[in-house]
Image (cartoon, rainbow, N blue to C red):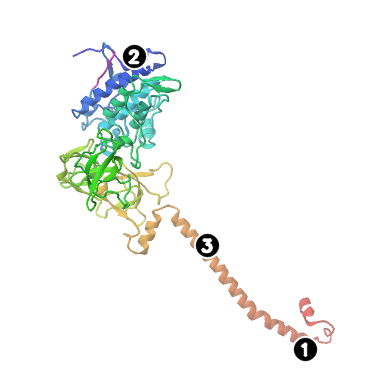
Amino acid sequence: MKFYEGSVGDKMARLKGGKLSMSDVLRYGADLAQGVMDLHSKEILILNLKPFNFLLNENDRAILGDIGIPYVLLGVSLRSIDMIRRLGTPNYMAPEQWHPEVTGPLSFETDSWGFGCSIVEMLTGIQPWSGKSIDEIYKLVVKKQEKPHIPSGLPPAVENVIIGCFEYDFMSRPMMSDILQAFKSSQNAVYQDGGWTGLGSIIIREKQGGGNYTEWFLAKDHLQVGDMVRSRKLPNSCKPENMDVPEGSVVGLERDTDRDGLVLVRMHGLHDPIRVHASTLERVTFGLAAGDWVLLKKEDKRHSPVGILHSIDRDGNVAVGFIGLETLWKGNYSELEMAKPYCVGQFIRLRSNVFSPRFEWPWRRCGEWAAGRICQILPNGCLVIEFPGRLTLSNENRSFLADPAEVELVSFDTCPGLVKKYQHLEDFHWAVRPLLIALGLFTAMKLGLRVGRKLGRSKVKKGHNPAIQNDGQHVDGQTGENTAWRPPKVANIFR
């Protein structure tokens, strides 16, 4: 076994300010990205990237140490006090790394987050989330979805890729090949006159037609001639859209090496192929595309049968995220079938035949499962639910989790009868019921006052006029000689 005298972390500790020069960061970054890529090619995840695990050899090149130990310990039952540390070092852990069987799964892009944290520490000399406890880091990273501060003044390619490393959804993060390209292209960069010169051939361009997808998500797959494709839907969209390419085949590429180039697509019913931007298309293989909701034909009780397809190669090999699995499930497309998709903003509730759900779920007052709104969809299909129809206190849970295999959609169309439709109306906000009660009371009071006024006027009309006539008769009959000199109306006023 080779012995290394120090690490990148040790070198930083000896420097004033604890930070490295830009040239050292770029060189070490390229070394580490290449090392991580080599391990990823062997299906090994690191999960514990940090400066003190980057060893330095006699040529001042960075070498990975502590290789994949957290990955080896996945699935091993440990005491709760050791659970977090077995998954990595909290200051460098990605959001899905804290509870991978629930908020995961772990993937190659999980290491991209740890790599980004390490580079930020090398540049600033400050550990991410320095001085924070484990619980505080968990709340910042997982609950509040905050990201480490990235220093300014970096080469554009490096800055772009480091920003991508901190995407909350790991599918939107760069792969190590993207990171390696960015660092290698910037190694000869020189900062002068307010800008960078000597940059490599990498080009950062605005993605066109890719919706809200990051360029790293769009770069996961490259189209080839002969691929079946369709227009890419907007993320978290279930609304039917007019697709420019409902289904077609790629018959030509404008530039094979440009992932942002144009492709020629032939569609049924059209004589000539159409030119379409590559980022607006997704590859469809055996009827499946990355991001589709899928159902496992043969159910496994260890995990949910419903998940999200992360990748499918041209041979039909698939990788799927399921609740209950810490890593991606690997198999063949023939083991899957399409499942009903869910989108942010939809209302759902537990199925009536679910008596013991995987996650805690609130009840209605009438003893039925409450309905909540999807506010986030995790990479394994786990649904994050809010209940705007429930008034919660500050110390109570404001969001819940749900297994997509245990829920059903709720809408006004699916609610039978007026009572159920009204109950669904209450699901939109807790103020609906008190507002309707207040509106009902106000309407009843207003109606009561109006009826009371009408009744009062009718009584006055029936009782007031005869009294005047009687008074007139009494005056004329008994005291006529005393009031003969006064007009009758004035006499009535004085009475």
Q: In the displayed structure, would residue 424 be above or below residue 361?
A: below
Q: CA distance from mark 1 to mark 3?
A: 52 Å
**Residue 62 lies in the magenta stretch:** yes
Secondary structure of the residue carrying tag 3 is helix
Q: Amino acid at mark 3?
A: Phe
User: Residue 11: which numbered mark, if any?
Assistant: 2
Mark nearer the N terminus (2 vs 1) = 2
Which corner quadrant of the image does residue 395 belong to? top left
Residue 319 is situated, as x and y percent measured from the top left of the image, at 20, 39
Which residue is located at x 18 percent, y 28 percent?
42
Q: Which residues are magenta?
A: 60-66
Residue 360 is situated, as x and y percent measured from the top left of the image, at 31, 45
Secondary structure of the residue carrying tag 1 is helix
Q: Quadrant of the C terminus?
A: bottom right
In the rendered image, which residue does mark 3 sit on?
Answer: 442
Mark nearer the N terminus (1 vs 3) = 3
